[in-house]
Image (tube, helix red, strand yellow):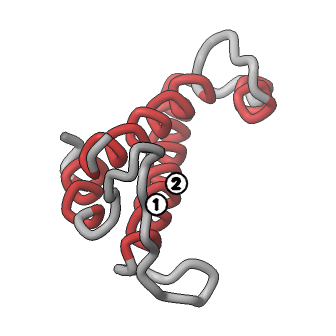
């Protein structure tokens, strides 16, 4: 795995969470709670934007934190990430995270 694949995997997870939370037959507690609100179509659009932006913020800041570009819990430092084959995954996370999470690649 390379750095871009690592970031893309986070982006795919974000998309999967969003899809599950907003599905018509959710299995997760969050999805069931949202469904229980019986939102109108307009409210569903707003909820989707809220969830999409929230998940983007969470995943994006975690990735930037791992790269040393943002703090995690008030501590900012660079972490050395490697996959199980020893491939370096840190050092260029910020650029790929911006592409996927801010430019919606």
Q: CA distance from mark 1 to mark 2?
A: 5 Å
Circle 1 packing at 10 Å, graded few (<14), some (14-19), many (20+), is few
Q: Quadrant of the C terminus?
A: top left
Q: How many marks?
A: 2
Q: Nearer the viewer, residue 16 or 78?
A: 78
Is 61 positioned to the left or the right of 100 in the image? right
Is 35 positioned to the left or the right of 22 in the image? right
Q: Are marks 1 and 2 in contact (CB under 8 Å)?
A: yes
Residue 17, image x and y in percent? 56, 33
Residue 97, image x and y in percent? 29, 56
User: Tag 2's secondary structure?
Assistant: helix
Q: Which residue is mark 1?
A: 57
Is 3 positioned to the left or the right of 51 in the image? left
What residue is shown at x 59% (from left), y 89% (from top)?
Answer: 74
Q: Which residue is mark 2?
A: 54
Residue 7, image x and y in percent? 34, 48
Whether residue 2 is situated above or below residue 71 in the rendered picture: above
Is 35 positioned to the left or the right of 8 in the image? right
User: Tag 1's secondary structure?
Assistant: helix
What residue is shown at x 34% (from left), y 57% (from top)?
Answer: 89
Residue 104, image x and y in percent? 23, 43
């Amino acid at each position: 795995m390379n750095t871009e694949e690592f970031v893309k995997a986070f982006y795919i997870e974000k998309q999967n969470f969003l899809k599950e939370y907003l599905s018509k037959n959710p299995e997760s507690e969050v999805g069931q709670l949202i469904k229980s609100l019986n939102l109108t179509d307009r409210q569903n659009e707003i909820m989707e934007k809220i969830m999409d932006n929230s998940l983007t913020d969470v995943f994006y800041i975690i990735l930037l934190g791992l790269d040393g570009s943002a703090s995690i819990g008030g501590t900012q430092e660079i972490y050395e990430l490697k996959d199980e084959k020893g491939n370096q995954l840190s050092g260029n996370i910020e650029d790929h995270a911006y592409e996927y999470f801010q430019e919606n690649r």
